[in-house]
Image (spheres, rainbow, N blue to C red):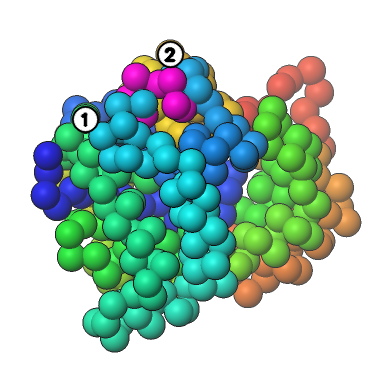
């Protein structure tokens, strides 16, 4: 079992493409994408969340990988899972990011409930490193406070990948439900977008060279190049699994939670999705733009966006993970 597993923790707001990016990395030898590990206890063990299915299609507790991991680490205990989820709510929400960073910067120990959760996470990372993730474990949980706390662990080699997407695109993505993902208003999704990305920026200020930010739009415009950049950031020397045309062949994965498209295997074409420019109602575009204004320019997104006409007799290009 690896003593100090290498972990790539993905942060940022949802619907940014992190699930697909993690599954692309999962195609590299010795890399294991765990999905959103934060939800292992709530969704996988307690089955109290929105989805308890592994990316392989089995229930998490019945999955060949996770059943073995849970048995080996003892994380399948229901009462322990309830304690973990309670501690996560009390100490590892986005609003706790500053407190977790303060602990890391002081060099002192984290709060006792935080340390208890992180000890369990470290145990899981070690177990996953011994079961296919010996070179890298990818955790797409996207909780900035969790990323901040993990930076202080000396028994883990943690790097933070911050993935950003235009808030108008995520507003449209959340406008309709998708399988087990409930809809959300543009105001709510953009408020979360702003909070999660601002907190991720704080994490980046503490992480230094262990932090990288990539934009969804750059990923879909040049998937092979951006994936290669992420691979190098993670300390790997592999060639990108994405071909020059933006297609990648995805095999089975063992993601505990994430975008429903994680259940799709085979050839996946990574393409841009600009439907929000024609399908997001103008009032919703204004709402999302206004709420995200402090960060729009920082991420090089335009404030004023000319509204386009929907194409006639031609389907818009769509990125498969949306």
Please give the range of residues in magenta: 60-66
Which mark is on residue 150?
none
Where residue 288 sits: x, y (%)? 75, 60
Q: Residue furthest bottom?
A: 106
Q: Is residue 72 visible?
A: yes
Where residue 308 sits: x, y (%)? 78, 42
Which mark is on residue 131?
1
Q: Is 279 left, or right, of 144 in this rendering?
A: right
Which mark is on residue 266?
2
Q: Residue at x 86, y 47 (%)?
A: 281
User: Residue 162 appears in which quarter of the rendering?
Assistant: bottom left
Q: Secondary structure at mark 1?
A: loop
Q: Residue at x 43, y 20 (%)?
A: 62
Q: Is residue 221 visible?
A: no
Instruction: Nearest to the eye among marks 1 and 2: give it.
Output: 1
User: Residue 152 appears in which quarter of the rendering?
Assistant: bottom left
Q: Is residue 298 magenta?
A: no
- Placement of the C terminus among the 4 image quadrants: top right
Question: Can you say whether 312 is above or below 298 in the image?
Answer: above
Count of numbered labels shown in the rendering: 2
Most foreground residue, 66 or 249: 66
Q: Earlier in the sequence, mark 1 or mark 2?
A: 1
User: Residue 119 appears in which quarter of the rendering?
Assistant: bottom left
Where residue 1 sits: x, y (%)? 12, 39
Q: Residue at x 80, y 52 (%)?
A: 185
Where residue 51 sits: x, y (%)? 60, 32
Q: Are marks 1 and 2 in contact (CB under 8 Å)?
A: no
Q: Secondary structure at mark 2?
A: strand
């Amino acid at each position: 079992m690896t003593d100090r597993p290498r972990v790539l923790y993905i942060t940022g707001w949802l619907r940014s493409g992190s699930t697909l990016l993690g599954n692309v990395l999962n195609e590299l030898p010795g890399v294991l994408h765990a999905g959103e590990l934060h939800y292992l206890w709530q969704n996988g063990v307690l089955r109290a969340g929105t989805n308890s299915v592994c990316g392989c299609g089995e229930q998490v507790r019945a999955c060949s990988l996770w059943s073995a991991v849970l048995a080996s680490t003892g994380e399948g205990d229901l009462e322990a899972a309830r304690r973990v989820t309670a501690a996560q709510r009390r100490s590892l929400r986005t609003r706790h990011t500053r407190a977790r960073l303060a602990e890391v910067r002081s060099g002192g120990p984290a709060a006792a409930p935080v340390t208890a959760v992180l000890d369990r996470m470290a145990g899981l990372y070690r177990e996953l490193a011994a079961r296919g993730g010996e070179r890298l474990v990818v955790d797409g949980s996207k909780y900035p406070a969790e990323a901040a706390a993990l930076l202080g662990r000396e028994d883990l080699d943690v790097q933070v990948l911050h993935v950003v997407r235009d808030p108008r695109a995520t507003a449209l993505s959340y406008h309709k439900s998708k399988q087990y993902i409930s809809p959300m208003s543009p105001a709510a999704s953009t408020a979360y977008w702003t909070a999660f990305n601002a907190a991720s920026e704080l994490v980046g200020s503490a992480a230094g060279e262990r932090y990288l930010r990539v934009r969804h739009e750059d990923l879909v415009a040049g998937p092979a190049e951006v994936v290669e950049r992420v691979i190098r950031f993670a300390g790997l020397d592999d060639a990108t699994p994405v071909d020059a045309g933006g297609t990648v062949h995805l095999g089975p994965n063992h993601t505990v939670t994430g975008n429903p498209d994680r259940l799709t295997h085979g050839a996946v074409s990574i393409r841009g999705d600009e439907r929000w420019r024609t399908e997001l109602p103008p009032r919703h575009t204004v709402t999302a733009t206004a709420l995200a204004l402090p960060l729009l320019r920082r991420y090089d997104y335009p404030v004023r966006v000319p509204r386009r006409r929907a194409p006639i007799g031609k389907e818009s290009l769509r990125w498969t993970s949306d």
